[in-house]
Image (cartoon, rainbow, N blue to C red):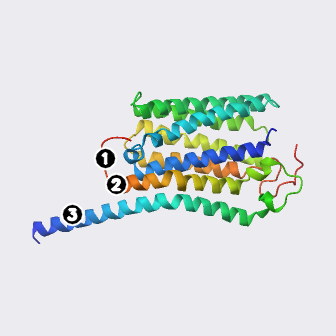
Amino acid sequence: MIPHAETAHWIAASVALLLGLVLLSEVIVGTDVFRRRRWRAYLWPSLALVSGVLIWLIAILSTFSTIHLLAHAIWAEAAMIAGAVELAVVRGKLSSPRWSLVAAAALLISGLSFLVHEQNPWLYSRAAFLHHAIGWMLVVAALFPLGRALRPQRTVLWGTGFALTFVLLAVMLFADRDSASIFGHFGEIPRP
Amino acid sequence: MSSEYATTIRERRAHGRRTRRSSARPIAIQLIGPLTILAGIVWAIAQPYRIVFLDRDGRGLYDYLFQPPLLVVVVGLIYALVLAPGLVEDLESGPRDSAR
């Protein structure tokens, strides 16, 4: 039983919300306290890695359109690479703050994929509007990990921005509908 | 004014700021979960047609279990029950050297 696209987006939104809250917690309590328990230190990289694996499943199911297949495959790879690098950072294998450039690249590539794979204009439907909005939001949000790589001393600013990016992403994905006008109700446009 | 008194006042102010900050952090952590749950409940009240249990006509498993307000509540519960207690405990226990 394959879920509708909106259901898959809502599940992804839940993971994004949890990721955002985990990252926000780390900013609030500080990295030292947050990583005091090993499982907590590995939580964010593991969630990113697992979400990459789950997006591969979506990619497999998105064969109705080549561009959807490619976009989901790119998101899966970006999430898995960012998660793997974060795992190595937490483990202590990688120590340079410049490794945040990987997360910045992942967000940038994800944003561009959102923009490229939406073939309808902004105001066509709610799904189209959200794809454009999420795409541009992720492109701009790539500045937070970029800032962390170049100015690592402003940890709170970059960390808060990065965490809130995922909370905002969750809100947008939760608002998604397969067939509805931007501010209307479900069912106004027939489901494909 | 004596430099001894001035130093004491500065130290008291700094200590007050540190205390306020250290007490605000556990409260913030404890609030995140309930606020998330509250957001889900408010959403469910604002859009009751998303809760399929109330209107079951021709709906499938995904419609029952994966509706956004329910998912938001579940995320809030996971945060409040799994993540927040340990974080608050670690915050209140003060600095420590080794990781568990």
Residue A128 in view here: no
**Under tag 1, what secondary structure?**
loop
Which of the 4 image quarters holds residue A81?
Answer: top right
Task: Give the answer, above or below, for where A117 lies relative to B35.
Answer: above
Quarter of the image with the C terminus of chain B in it: top left
Q: Amino acid at mark 2?
A: Ser
Give A51 or A65, whichever is nearer the viewer: A51
In the image, A52: left or right of A101?
right
Give A172 or B56, whichever is nearer the viewer: B56
Instruction: Compute the Cα span from label 3 to label 2.
Output: 23 Å
Residue at position x 44%, y 52% in the image: B87
CB under 8 Å between discs 3 and 2: no
Residue at position x 45%, y 48% in the image: A26
Q: Residues within 10 Å of mark 2 (few under 14, many from 20)?
A: few
Residue B11 lies, in percent from the top left, at: 21, 63
Q: Amino acid at mark 1?
A: Arg
**Under tag 3, what secondary structure?**
helix
**Are discs 3 and 2 located on one and the same chain?**
yes
* Label placed on residue B11: 3
* Label placed on residue B93: 2
Q: Which residue is mark 1?
A: B96
Quarter of the image with the N terminus of chain B in it: bottom left
Q: Amino acid at mark 3?
A: Glu
